[in-house]
């Protein structure tokens, strides 16, 4: 089942603080990623337009948070 939900940064921090684990997907384009000094360690780099095609590669055991900056 796919759910399109939004989560605030405060809610994410709260849930992580209580021990919940998440998978993070960085959906920025390659140019934005290369020029950014903000990179979340362990995040999966995957362009937004490829999410559906590569969904079988995504973790199934924890919620997934996609982000771009």
Image: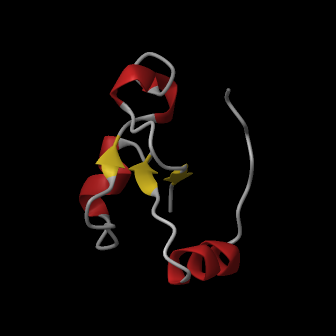
Most extreme residue toward the top is 53
The residue located at (69%, 75%) in the rendering is 11
Residue 2 located left or right of residue 31 = right
Which residue is nearer to you in this view: 36 or 64?
A: 64
Q: Is residue 47 left or right of residue 11?
A: left
Image quarter (top left, top right, bottom left or bottom right) of the N terminus:
top right
Name the spot of residue 58 as percent of width and height, x first: 39, 34
Q: Is residue 30 left or right of residue 13?
A: left
- On the rendered structure, is 37 left or right of 29? left
The count of marks equals 0
Quarter-wise, where is residue 14 in the image?
bottom right
Q: x and y percent of residue 65 in the render?
A: 54, 53
Answer above or below: position of 2 versus 38: above
- Residue at 44%, 16% in the rendered image: 53
Of 60 and 56, the residue lying toward us: 60
Instruction: Note whether 10 is above or below 58 in the view shown.
Output: below
**Residue 31 rendering spot, x and y as whole percentages:** 31, 48
Task: Tell me the quarter of the picture where residue 36 sits.
Answer: bottom left
């Amino acid at each position: 089942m796919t759910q399109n939900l939004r989560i605030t940064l405060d809610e994410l921090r709260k849930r992580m603080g209580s021990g919940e684990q998440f998978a993070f997907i960085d959906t920025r384009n390659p140019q934005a990623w290369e020029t950014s000094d903000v990179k979340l360690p362990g995040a999966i780099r995957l362009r937004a337009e490829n999410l559906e095609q590569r969904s079988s590669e995504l973790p199934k055991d924890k919620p997934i948070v996609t982000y771009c900056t």
